[in-house]
Amino acid sequence: MEFNKRYEIYLDYINEALEKILVVRDVPEKTCYEAMKYSLMAGGKRIRPVLSLVVCDLFGKEFKEVIAYACAIEMIHTYSLIHDDLPSMDNDDYRRGRLTNHKVYGEGLAVLAGDALLNYAFEVMIEDALKSADNIVSKVKAMQYIAKASGTTGMIGGQVVDLQSEGKKVSLETLTYMHKCKTGAMIKAPIVSSAIICGADETQVSRLSIFAEKIGLAFQIKDDILDIEGDLSTLGKNSGSDVSNDKTTYITAYGLDGAKKILDEVTKEGISALESFGVEADFLKNMALYIAKRNN
Amino acid sequence: MEFNKRYEIYLDYINEALEKILVVRDVPEKTCYEAMKYSLMAGGKRIRPVLSLVVCDLFGKEFKEVIAYACAIEMIHTYSLIHDDLPSMDNDDYRRGRLTNHKVYGEGLAVLAGDALLNYAFEVMIEDALKSADNIVSKVKAMQYIAKASGTTGMIGGQVVDLQSEGKKVSLETLTYMHKCKTGAMIKAPIVSSAIICGADETQVSRLSIFAEKIGLAFQIKDDILDIEGDLSTLGKNSGSDVSNDKTTYITAYGLDGAKKILDEVTKEGISALESFGVEADFLKNMALYIAKRNN
């Protein structure tokens, strides 16, 4: 099956699951559900939960084993975008071609809708873990992996460094550290958590981890490139915002051509890490190319 | 042992555990840990985690069984205060006699420190659950109870209703609903989650739930009374902020005397719910009186 067709199958499965999980309830706090849903269902490539399902397929398990964790990761990713867009952070008006959450619902509700998505992500994972009597330990371990990836030792830590770096010339070391935490951890989380749930052995987890780290880095470099080369119509947000915010990026550090060369290299290194999985991992390898070649 | 002395023992145990759990790490995102710690270690009565330990004592179990959940609840409570104090929410400059988190660390970092505390609360509970092989199901059930209490069906839902009610005359029904979610759920959470971990039976959980609901309501009514009668030196924040924000409270609804009468009634109802526990529940009963009589 060609890549796009199979990607669509993953995507449809995820969007359907997210629709089912997050229902707008007719209660006094209804607007909170609407604000959560506004950002969660804003479309997007769903790269993180797709990675969960691809890894699940690699181990020949059913999607229902990992879907709660895939959805939770997408909810955590979405909440981080809502908070990141706030006036006190990146102050962005557009995201995925639509007004950002606080531009529609106001700043106070955007803070709460973000909080609610993070909290709900754990509710969804916990509910699934309690339903899996015979596999509860693996499920709680997967939850732990995701929680560490989204916390101070991962995504939030990276965002703090990002916030502190604005308007400053930061070192390459800091830049790499920030990317590894801010973006890398939540690209690695679906891959490793899925592997844990599906019973991967240590060697398999270790190889998948290397792959995940490489494509996480590729993802961030590509983001920096798109911020220069992209435009509002394909990107869904204003390009050049990194430049106007005077941020250090892979482009300011290595130049546009240098960044593209590094992107190629890390993508190849990621793919090599999967050799021992054979043809079964072809789709996962293609995910690396997809991340490097995407135009939004 | 007199009440204050025993309360001190609980308090010391909790403060020591919180100090151990949240260590400021020497990493680029160090400021995030500092901001988390600034609010988490700002003192306070620690009513919620104390309730966890009191219930644990009631069932004759060791504190180490429930301390992770007690600390998690305090972290969730603290993050909610940080976000609640933000300019886009209640816009408060003081909390517990000190500048609010965003006044010290800036708004962006205050949002992230709040997010980090919520995330870390789950990390702490998950780590404990994985260490308790023989009791993992009860621990994950306790975690689920706490997650639901802090999410859209609990605390966050209540905060959304609160935010939407500002400057409006809301109905008594809405007021009660809001308090039940915003404050009540997180007073009930330590009591019920502790009972679940300690192996309470259904009747016991049900009686403790009634007690918890009553003291949760009492807590909120007392808060409203203190907002009128308290002052900065004992309260640690500016009193009268509800009035100046034109909020509906138990005072605007029932008058000061009416609110005091309701406070007495619900406190008595809470205490009655514990009759079947006998003298073992005396300290828990005294907690109800403590909540009703506190002056900050």
Image (cartoon, coloured by chain):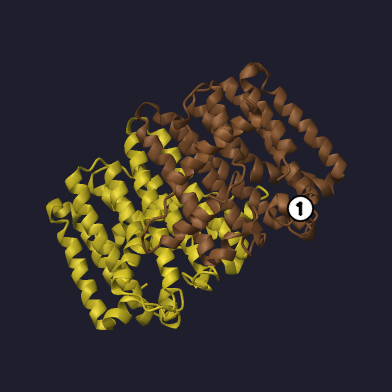
Chain colours: A yellow, B brown
Q: Residue at x 63, y 56 (%)?
A: A31
Quadrant of the rendering where the C terminus of chain B is positioned = top right
Residue B190 in picture, x, y percent from top left = 56, 35
* Residue B178, position as x, y percentages in the image: 69, 46
Is A42 placed left or right of A291 in the picture?
right
Residue nearest the observer in this picture, A5 or B70: B70
Q: Quadrant of residue B176?
A: top right
Q: Position of residue B89 (x, y in %)?
A: 65, 60
Q: Quadrant of residue B184?
A: top right
| Residue A14 image position (x, y, % from top left) | 40, 53
Residue beneath disc 1: B231
Q: Is residue B1 above or below residue B231?
A: above
Q: Residue at x 72, y 32 (%)?
A: B289
Per the image, label 1 sits on a secondary structure element best described as loop
Can residue B202 be seen from the camera position used here?
yes
Task: Give left or right: position of B234 versus A67.
Answer: right
Name the amino acid, label 1.
Answer: Asp
Front residue of this view, candidates A153 and A15: A153
Can you see residue A9?
A: no
* Disc 1: CA contacts within 10 A as few (<14), some (14-19) or many (>=20): some
User: Residue at 38% of width from left, 40% of height from top?
Assistant: B127
Toward the viewer: A87 or A50? A87
Q: Where does the N terminus of chain B fall, quadrant-wise?
A: top right
The disc numbered 1 marks a residue on which chain? B
Judge left or right: residue B185 versus residue A277.
Answer: right
- Count how many numbered circles sit on residues in the image: 1
